[in-house]
Amino acid sequence: MGWARKTPDNFTFALKVPQSITHEKILVDCDEEFNDFVTVAELLGPKLGPMLFQFGYFNRSVFTSRAQFIARLKPFLRKLPTAHKFAIEIRNKYWLTAGFFKLLREHNVAFALTDQSWMPGPNEIFAKVDPVTADFTYIRWLGGRKGIEQVTKVWNRIVVDRSAEMTSWFDVCTKIQRRGVTIYGYFNNHYAGFAPASVQLFRDMCIKNGLELPRPAAPPPMMVQRTLFD
């Protein structure tokens, strides 16, 4: 695969499962599509990192209850190839139950922690439940698309000060890493206006406070997301 040839040896790709599986078919009658996706992803070889199932909010026209979603998710998780890493992101805070986290933990699937206004913050969620459900953790600093795009659509500078939020995330990442859990973390441009600068600010915070980080792989010039932790 061209991506593998064009990136440094220590580069790790985190892929998103196609929306045809997560948004359109929503795990129903999609085995062939999913297997095709994984087969192609495997061409990345050792550079293949976690693959993310990013689900939407799912109103009552899709699922009448979280139990209905869990009933659909459970048999699908049983079929996941154990040789790869998978993470799941849901966007309904009322579905974050002990049963949901237990299910992910049983299959070594990571719960994707996100920084979004409609989801619990890192300290809030850790106060209620242990969201570390696999031998790695997946974090997405997404921010708010609507609010940021009212300020900029150029993506060349920080336009919102998120240092307070970063401090909370740093504390959480420290706790996770002390448990020997690998962290994959990704910033979006909508977090503060310029993802590469957000990455650097967070790395600087980690290094300043003595948290060991691997040397980052040099990304293509316009890359907006990078793994922070090894």
Image (cartoon, helix red, strand yellow):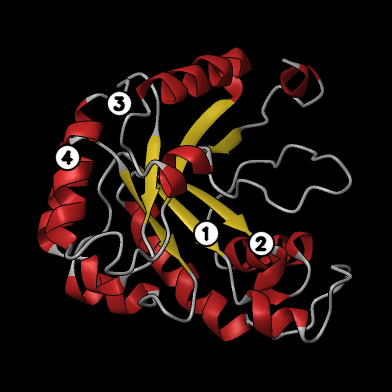
Label total for image: 4
Estimate the x, y position of residue 132 in percent, counting from the top left.
28, 53
* Residue at the image position 10 percent from the left and 56 percent from the top: 99
Residue 230 appearing in the image: no
Is there a contact, CB below 8 Å, between mark 2 and mark 1? yes
CA gap between label 3 and label 4 equals 11 Å
SS assignment at label 4: helix
What is the quadrant of residue 112 in the picture? Answer: bottom left
Is there a contact, CB below 8 Å, between mark 3 and mark 4? no
- Which circle, 1 or 4, is nearer the viewer? 4
* In this picture, residue 53 sits left or right of residue 9: left
CA gap between label 1 and label 4 equals 24 Å
The front one of 48 and 178 is: 48
Q: Which residue is mark 4?
A: 74
CA gap between label 2 and label 1 equals 8 Å
Estimate the x, y position of residue 180 in percent, counting from the top left.
34, 44
Q: Disc 3 or 1, which lies upstream in sequence?
A: 3
Q: Disc 2 or 3, which lies upstream in sequence?
A: 3
* Residue at the image position 22 percent from the left and 76 percent from the top: 127
CA gap between label 2 and label 3 equals 27 Å
Q: Which residue is mark 2?
A: 188
Q: Which residue is mark 1?
A: 140
Residue 80 appearing in the image: yes
Circle 2: residue type: Asn
Q: Residues within 10 Å of mark 4 (few under 14, many from 20)?
A: some
Is there a contact, CB below 8 Å, between mark 1 and mark 4? no
